[in-house]
Amino acid sequence: MATKYGLAKAAIEALQREADVEQLDPADVQEALMVTLIQAMKDSRGSGWLKQFLQYEVDMLGSGGVHDVPRGGGHS
């Protein structure tokens, strides 16, 4: 059974391979992915939720590891 982080890592690895094939800078492709994901998350969860989520992630930079945002109602 795949985890959400496992699926995300596999998608990033596939994107990196495709970037290599297309001779694109991997960091530029990651940036484009992040911008696209932010827009998709805003559309699905709203800008208020997204701001909280992004602030949490910014606050966690440098702390190491992956931190899941705590959510109410048993969601993760």
Image: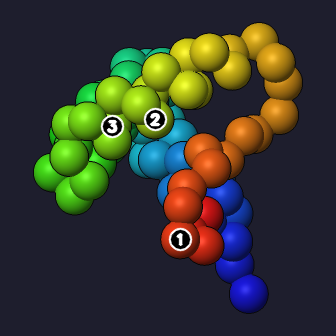
Is residue 21 in view from this perspective? yes
Residue 19 picture quarter: top left
Tell me where residue 41 appears, x and y as whole percent: 28, 48
Residue 73 is labelled as 1
Q: Is residue 65 above or below residue 61?
A: below
Mark before the other along the chain sequence, 1 or 3 = 3
Check whether the beta carbons of the residues at disc 2 and disc 3 lie within 8 A of each other: yes
Residue at (15% x, 51% y) in the render: 43
Residue 50 is labelled as 3
Disc 1 from disc 3: Cα separation:
18 Å
Mark before the other along the chain sequence, 1 or 2 = 2
Tell me where residue 68 appears, x and y as whole percent: 66, 47
Residue at (66% x, 58% y) in the render: 5
Q: What amino acid is found at the position of numbered circle 1 in the picture?
A: Gly
Q: What amino acid is found at the position of numbered circle 2 in the picture?
A: Phe
User: Helix, strand, or loop for circle 1?
Assistant: loop
User: Helix, strand, or loop for circle 3?
Assistant: helix
Tell me where residue 38 appears, x and y as whole percent: 29, 37
Is 71 left, or right, of 39 in this rendering? right
Check whether the beta carbons of the residues at disc 1 and disc 2 lie within 8 A of each other: no
> Which residue lies under the disc numbered 2?
53
- Which mark is nearer the camera, 1 or 2? 1
Tell me where residue 58 appears, x and y as whole percent: 56, 17
Residue at (62% x, 50% y) in the render: 70
Query: Quick one: quadrant of the C terminus?
Result: bottom right
- Which mark is nearer the camera, 1 or 3? 1
